[in-house]
Image: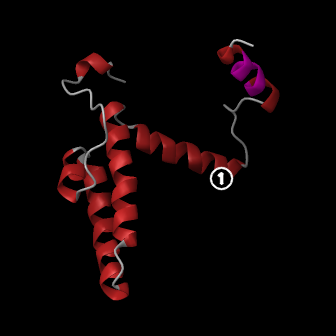
Amino acid sequence: MASPAAFPDPAPVPPPAEPQAIRRWLTPVLAAEFDHEWELTLEAAKRSKDLAGVHEMLGRWRHIAYLERRDPGAYHRLLTKADQISRTGSNPDAASYDELRVLIRRRLGR
């Protein structure tokens, strides 16, 4: 993983919820996924005469673009991890409830 200093633009906020702005922040592979979903979403909006799905899709993708800008490859690592958890039914990296409570207390200074 590259250090944050390796990127000239620290991307302090997600891109606007506009297709072209989002695409500029995506890798070619993710841009192809975006384009495919964009076409499906537009077709659904045409049929339903409702733009809610378009707004939801753009909102989701702007955060994916932001995540990728800050940590390249993070989205695919997230998908891989979700697939592993779905297949095995457990997360080997997960902390127990008690461990999380201790961590939270420590962070809160209690």
Q: Position of residue 19 (x, y in %)?
A: 22, 58
Q: What is the crowding at mark 1: few (fewer than 14 residues within 10 Å), some, or many (at least 20)?
A: few
Queried whether the magenta region covers residue 103, the answer comes back as yes
Left or right for 49, reference 98 = left
Looking at the figure, which quarter contains the N terminus? top left
Magenta stretch: dominant secondary structure: helix
Question: Height in image: 41 above or below 56?
Answer: below
Q: Position of residue 79 (x, y in %)?
A: 50, 48
- Residue extending farthest top: 109
Question: Height in image: 96 above or below 29?
Answer: above
- Residue extending farthest bottom: 47
Queried whether the magenta region covers residue 88, the answer comes back as no
Residue beneath the point at 29% across and 75% down: 42
Indicate how the structure is coloured in the image.
Answer: secondary structure
Number of numbered tags placed on the structure image = 1
Q: Position of residue 40 (x, y in %)?
A: 33, 74
Check disc 1 and report its element: helix, strand or loop: helix
Left or right for 96, reference 10 = right
Left or right for 8, reference 70 = left
Tell me the amino acid under the disc marked 1. Ser
Q: Where are the magenta residues, as a range?
A: 100-105
Residue corresponding to mark 1: 86
Q: Quadrant of residue 9?
A: top left
Residue beneath the point at 42% across and 37% down: 74
Q: Position of residue 105 (x, y in %)?
A: 73, 19
User: Toward the viewer: 86 or 101?
Assistant: 101
Residue beneath the point at 40% across and 54% down: 60
User: Toward the viewer: 81 or 49?
Assistant: 49
Residue beneath the point at 75% across and 13% down: 110
User: Toward the viewer: 90 or 34?
Assistant: 34
